[in-house]
Amino acid sequence: MKKKLLALMMVAVLAFSLAACGGGSSDSAEESGEAAAPAEETTETTETTEATEAVASGVEDGVLTVGMECAYAPYNWAQTDDSNGAVPISNFDGYANGYDVMMAKKLCEANGWELEVMAIGWDGLVPALNAGQLDAVIAGQSMTETRMQEVDMAGPYFYASIVCVTQKDNALASATGISQLSGACTAQTGTIWYDSCLPQIEGAELMPASETAPAMIMAATSGTVDYICTDMPTAMGACATYDNLVILDFSGSDDNFEVDEGEINIGISVVKGNTFLLDAMNAVLAEMTVEDFNNTMNEAILVQPEISCLLLTGLPDGSPVSVRISIVIGRNHYHG
């Protein structure tokens, strides 16, 4: 009887134990399930946050940080004071002015932003933008298919025809088409002028590309090359500064450079997916006409100081990008 009773008690204890174990497993599963849901929500939240950060406008702080060479007159240049509406360069001891600065100020005024300008070398502009150092690049960039694979572009904010520049006493000054051009030539590195236009000239003796627009212009005015290829605003700015230069404009001729519309449309680069900034800028530009653009460009050319010297400097923020700055001081020569 005792054995039977003991056996029954053991069975009861075993059953209780199994039930307890089963209950624990069930509770654990429920707890595991409850824990899994927040984990999934956390993952989704993280992904959403990352996506939001990836397309952040950049102007949440009310400041539009714009990158430009500050060495590409009349689009942009550096000077030693704030005359004619120039603004401080945040990473260089100087002030920025030019068409790009004037347009950036219009965009900021319309949207209630403050403007910050950073000087960055031409080849470093898009990398700096995509690295989050800049909110936008306003630097006379053509709206090419290749560039728009890397960035989104607002605009156009200017329409620039392609021309050549030579010295007035050069035999090429009377050329009426690109087939009549020959001899040594150059253009700025990383531009359609050098990569696409000059190779279309059969008699071209292509020299190494100039690192900056000022260096390109100096090559023309010094006679280092017979002619350069650039856009109309740059050519106009050069001729306004150097009276020994003349523009060769083949527009309307069958004997002209073959370029796509995107190559002569000048736009503003923003990070891909930054629809807020893209839409905000396009809304302002849509209210402006070609005449507005041209008038602003003419204003920039009128106040463009004379290109005087080139300084090579590293960026104070520790960026590996080197920037070549064109310092301009009034209309007086400065030798340094």
Image (cartoon, rainbow, N blue to C red):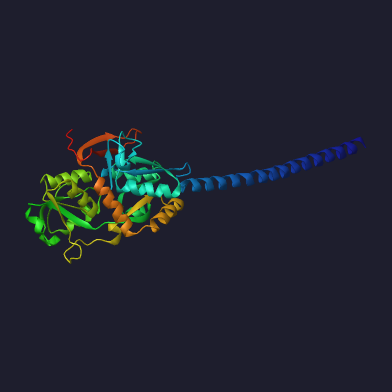
Q: Is residue 40 left or right of residue 211?
A: right
Point out residue 61 in the picture as x, y percentages from the top left corner.
47, 41
- Which of the image's four quarters has the C terminus? top left
Total marks shown come to 0
Residue 95: quadrant of the picture: top left
Point out residue 180 in the picture as x, y percentages from the top left corner.
10, 60
- Front-lying residue, 159 or 52: 159
Q: Is residue 257 left or right of residue 41?
A: left
Residue 80: quadrant of the picture: top left
Question: Looking at the image, can residue 74 be seen?
Answer: no
The single residue placed furthest to the right in the displayed view is 1
- Front-lying residue, 216 or 45: 216
- Which of the image's four quarters has the N terminus? top right
Location of residue 186 with respect to 252 vertically, above or below:
above
**Residue found 35% across the figure and 47% down from its top:** 137
Point out residue 221 in the picture as x, y percentages from the top left corner.
13, 46
The single residue placed furthest to the bottom in the displayed view is 254
Residue 7: quadrant of the picture: top right
**Residue found 69% across the figure and 45% down from its top:** 29
Q: Is residue 234 left or right of residue 137?
A: left
Question: Looking at the image, can residue 312 be seen?
Answer: yes
Point out residue 263 in the picture as x, y percentages from the top left corner.
28, 57
Location of residue 293 with respect to 321 vertically, above or below:
below
**Residue found 39% across the figure and 45% down from its top:** 130
